[in-house]
Amino acid sequence: MESAFPVVLVVIKTLIVLAAVLTFVAYLTLIERKVLGWIQVRIGPNRVGPWGLLQPLADGAKLLLKEEITVSSANTVVYIAAPLIVVVCALIPFAVIPFAKGLGLESLLGPVAGKFDLNTGVIADINLGILYILGISSLGVYGVILGGWASNSKYSLLGSIRAAAQMISYELGLSLSVVGVLILAGTLSLVQIVEAQDSVYKWFVFRQPLGFLLFLIAGSAEIARTPFDLMECENELVAGYQTEYSSMKFGLFYLGEYAHLLFLSSMMTTLFFGGWQGPVLPPVVWFLGKTFFFVFVFVWIRGTYPRLRYDRVMQFGWKALLPAGLFNVMATAFVYMIWVQYVSR
Amino acid sequence: METILFYVLAVVTLLSAVFVIFLRRPIHNVLFMILTMIGLATLFILLHAEFIAMVQIIVYAGAVMVLFLFVIMLLNLEEIDLPREPRPLRWGFGVILSLALVVMLFPVFKSIAPIINGVAQNGDLAAASNLDLIAKELFTTYLLPFEIASFLLLAAIIGTVVIGRKLTKS
């Protein structure tokens, strides 16, 4: 009985996080449309439910009821697998994001809690959390490549090649922008990174401003948000690798896209803005508040900036972002070593 | 529990490795090779070598195999373009070479088998996921090989840039 307890608790935690993520993802579409509406002096969706609040449900029902088309020239197995890969790779990184300090179940769990280290507000506190995230995000590229290839259409293939090249290029910048934080925190565990930022002036955004900027840019290129959404720019490529997908398969790509957005926002919160740390209010509220602030920032960016040209995107990634990232790592390591050796003693 | 998990993952990994060789469409081979890499990473996790597992996923499954996939997609290799039956001479060579490899590797397996068994039972390999330890070893004991490897990689990067650059007339 006692040995089954941690497994049950982890399953419960997973279900809660999964349900929360899926609900938030559904409502991200509404947030995006509403905020874009305000930016463009429109009203946005307001027909389904008060303030358009039931719009995501209507969208979901619509996606489910649409005809499921499998292109006759498609490679069926790969064609079906691609959206699944995208969704899985978008959802499983949430396992290492610490969303709260603890579950507040001390009295319920009693001595068992300390024994299994269960009372943590994260599904899995693995000590290589960042590497896990980078590994999974590098696997996410496959869904995009395979989706475009298996559709057997020119728009899809071009879109997916663009997407893959962009994601591989910006993944380097993304990894490098995180290294500064890792040096300062001295750990790869996201739980410990959050614990290292226990007051506002210790937030890593103040000690790693360049790192944060690089993370913001590389991150939005990695998840293909607007200044970088070259892979699905509708005036050249119809919808890129998603062109031949319909119904729920398209819905899965969409789900993956918004799950990525939510994940990137929560990563920014965790790495640079103190995660769940904050006064008065409960940690979960702080975590969600900061996360949704960054969701808003991403929508804001989408409403503000035009799309870049593809060769410029690649040039920027390799010739500006990567050197800046390397510089940030070197400078951080240098200053940190000086600090440890001479100042803090 | 861990034993059952090991056998399931080992079977998946080995089956994917077999599919890599025996399937006819190049793109399927690459997909199964990715699965093999991920399977290997999970086996590393079972050995408590999480760092190696993550690096395996990032470097091999994530980066190297994407390039494989790219090349096959861009060349648009289909089954039709491939030779149907391998020639008998090559077939014989292949068998002989693989047997030679097994013979060569046998003493190695034999010598490390007890170590792996003992370590896996003691859980001592947990140290292998300790980044501090790995970093210290890498930058003290194995500094020279590490630097040589980095230098070789740097040379390779410069080489690809030089080869990939368009020749300008001037």
Image: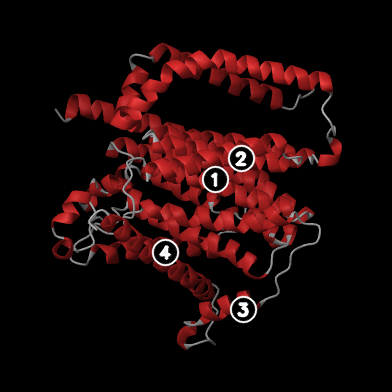
The residue tagged with tag 4: helix, strand or loop?
helix
Dots 4 and 1 on the same chain: yes
Residue appearing at x 48%, y 13% in the figure: B148
Circle 4 Cα neighbour tier, 10 Å, few/some/many (<14 / 14–19 / ≥20): some
Which of these two is toward me, A174 or B24? B24
Labels 4 and 3 within one chain: yes
Both marks 3 and 2 on one chain = no
User: Which chain letter goes with mark 1?
Assistant: A
Gap in Å between the C-alphas at discs 1 and 2?
A: 17 Å
Say which chain tag 3 marks: A
Q: Is residue A276 visible?
A: no
Q: Nearer the viewer, mark 3 or mark 2?
A: 2
Which of labels 2 and 4 is toward the front?
2
Residue closer to the observer: A210 or A245: A245
Look at the numbered discs 3 and 1 and tell me whether their residues touch, using CB distance below 8 Å. Answer: no
Q: Position of residue A306 (x, y in %)?
A: 60, 58
N-term-proximal mark, 3 vs 1: 3
Secondary structure beneath disc 2? helix
- Picture coordinates of residue A332, whole percent (x, y): 34, 33
Query: Are discs 3 and 1 both within one chain?
Result: yes
The mark nearer the N terminus, 4 or 1, is 4
Amino acid type, mark 2: Ser
Q: Which residue is mark 4?
A: A18
Q: Secondary structure at mark 3?
A: helix
Q: What residue is pinned by disc 2? A: B16
Dot 3 corresponds to which residue?
A62
Q: Nearer the viewer, mark 4 or mark 3?
A: 4
Pick whichever of labels 4 and 3 is earlier in the sequence: 4
Q: Which residue is mark 1?
A: A139
Tell me if label 4 and label 3 are in contact, CB under 8 Å: no
